[in-house]
Structures are given as structure tokens and as C-alpha cells.
Amino acid sequence: MMKNRIVRGIAGTFILVSLLLAIYVNINWLWFTAFVGANLLQSSLTKWCLMDTILEKLGIKD
């Protein structure tokens, strides 16, 4: 359960930061927002998430 909360927290943080960067730095940061959204959609369809794999390699278990 803890890993799922971390993944969601990281995804939410990436989205909010990229939106702020798009507003204050360059509109092209919205591509990063789209990338995160596409990865969330992909992980819901395939049940595989790259961030899950990264966290497992860092020693964080379910």
C-alpha cells in the first residue's frame, strides 16, 4: 500500500510542478504534464508502472 501512495504522490507532484512551469516559464512544459498523464493511463491498462519498478529497485516494498 505504501508504494501506491508514493507513486500517486510523485505523479501529482510532477503534474503540479509542470503546470507551474508552463505558467511561469514556458508553455512547452505542458508536454511533460501530458507525458505523466499518458503514463498513468498506460499503467491502468497494462498494470505495469515504471515508477513502481524504480521504487522496488530502491528497496521500497508494498
Image: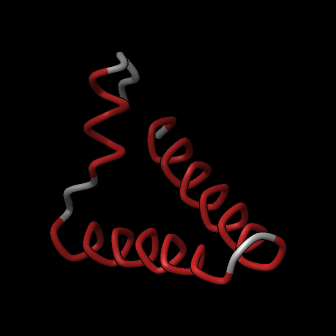
Q: Which residue is drawn at 46% across and 40% down?
A: 1
Q: Which residue is drawn at 45% across and 38% down?
A: 3
Q: Is residue 36 left or right of residue 28?
A: left
For the residue pair 58 and 31, the one nearer the viewer reads as 31
Above or below, 38 against 61 in this view is below
For the residue pair 32 and 47, the one nearer the viewer reads as 32
Q: Is residue 26 left or right of residue 11?
A: right
Which quadrant of the view contains residue 57?
Answer: top left
Which quadrant of the view contains residue 45?
Answer: bottom left
Q: Residue at x 34, y 78 (%)?
A: 41
Above or below, 47 against 19 in this view is above
- Estimate the x, y position of residue 43 in percent, counting from the top left: 27, 66
Which residue appears farthest toward the top when viewing the image?
A: 59
Above or below, 43 against 59 in this view is below
Q: Is residue 43 left or right of residue 9?
A: left
Which residue appears farthest toward the front when viewing the image?
A: 26
Q: Which residue is drawn at 39% across and 70% down?
A: 40
Which residue appears farthest toward the left when viewing the image?
A: 46
- Estimate the x, y position of residue 12 in percent, counting from the top left: 63, 61
Q: Name the quadrant of the C terminus.
A: top left
